[in-house]
Amino acid sequence: MKKIVKIYLLLAASLLTTSCSDSFLELAPISNATADNFKSTDDFELAINSAYASLYTVYHPEGPVSYCNEQMSDNAIMYNISGIQADKWQFKDYSLMTTNTMVYQFWQDYYRAVFSTNIVLDKIETASLSEAYKNDVRSQMRFLRALFYFNMVQTWGDIPLVTKPLSGDEAYAVPRSPQADVYDLIKKDLGFAIENLPLASAIPSTKIGRASKGAAQALLGKVYLTLGDKTSAANVLKDVYNSNQYALLSTYGSLWGPNVKNTKESIFEIQFLGGSASAPYSRYYQTFYPNNNFLGFYGSGMNQVTDDLYNEYEANDPRRDLSIALGYNNGTTFIAQKYPIKWTHTNAPIGSGNPLANNNFMVLRYADVLLMLSEATGDATYLNQVRTRAGLPKFGDAGYPTAFAGSLSTAIEHERRVELAIEFHRWFDLKRTNRAITVLQPKGKAITTDKLLLPIPQIVRSQNPVITQNNGYN
């Protein structure tokens, strides 16, 4: 346990030592001392932990993946009092402006994350270390870089493609690369990672939370699906399925809880350590709790559940009540306001007004792989494994709900929405299947073809004149 805690503390320390500049590519090194002194495995382990720590920002409950996939979808609304409210509501209303401060923050967050991988990849090439260790480092950093770029290309489309540390002058000459080039890099990075990462079962306990072969395969499967290459997606996802590394847990409820960590169903999971304000504690509980302080802390009211999502569940689906609370008690008064409860940590210690929660966050899990397999193969067998775990009728059986029985694709869309609710998938799912406009416009969303991408921040274009703007934002 002490060794595992040490990794958590290194992650926290690396966040504190990260420096940043005003450049849109965030060119300042992780720390000047660290960047100049990559020599030993200890130096690289600290830098690797710093790169993984970028996940805390990218997958923050108020980070870019959350805002895009929940606020821009039909899953969530918000009652949030901190920050610039107009900028936050622009995501929900599809009224994003090029001056939106959060879009610029998200751009910075992603390029900081990419830099944290590129600096390690650059320094490992000249390190006097074993080739086996160097390949392990390369494969982890290339997995993370692929994950970051995959989120970015889905968010902005064409983006500046940076694969090495750049000087300021070099950065200001980098144009946007076509999406096809970005996807080519993602596929190459993940291919290398698949060849060199260990199986999940071979990762030592001191390195829990680091990427595995299965994580790279699952992510590559999703990339292929996004590109419309179902044959390649099916092949790589079947490798995950046949690896015997992963399985559905026996019940949906057993997936959640502050002490549920790195189960057989988890493929790639962000590690948190609750109980101390100096450790990387989990913020999902507080951020997704309604905006009040009845429990000794202020909830942020982010990603409050829409009636539309709640009503998507079948009446006898146990996942609904394990995922969503109907409201909360203010003394003897019940306040009706639906909110997510997957990351609840009741009685978490409070530090400086924040619950120091212990819940991890799963970026990829096995149920996601099974549903992608049905999408890639057209075979409902995999989807039905997910429904069987929930105790619900299989697709194709007489008891399957007629509302979703029109086709396997609509069945998968329904199942992904309820199985993965508020896990940051919905908007990317709808875009991947070309259903975003069809689904969201009738629900009052001002979504158009142009609004399927976020604007390039105006400050980025002011700094770098070669950067062009997305359609609909000029």
Image: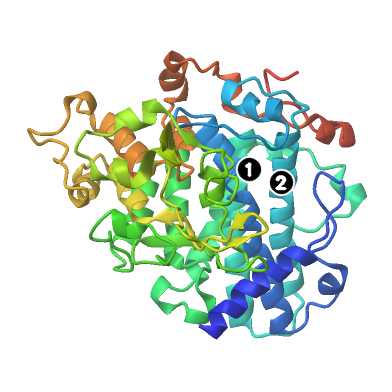
Label 2 SS: loop
- Quarter of the figure with the C terminus: top right
x, y percent for residue 75: 44, 32
Q: 233 and 102: which one is in front?
A: 102
x, y percent for residue 450: 60, 20
Q: 446 and 232: which one is in front?
A: 446
Q: Alpha carbon of mark 2 to alpha carbon of mark 1: how far?
A: 8 Å
- In the image, 204: left or right of 377? right
Instruction: State if disc 1 and disc 2 touch (CB < 8 Å).
Output: yes
- Residue at the spot x=53%, y=69% of the render? 210
Label 1 SS: helix
> What amino acid is found at the position of numbered circle 2 in the picture?
Leu
Q: Residue 71: which numbered mark, if any?
A: none
Q: Residue 181: which numbered mark, if any?
A: 1
x, y percent for residue 341: 42, 47
x, y percent for residue 424: 49, 43
Q: Is residue 344 above or below residue 416?
A: below
Q: Which residue is mark 2?
A: 161
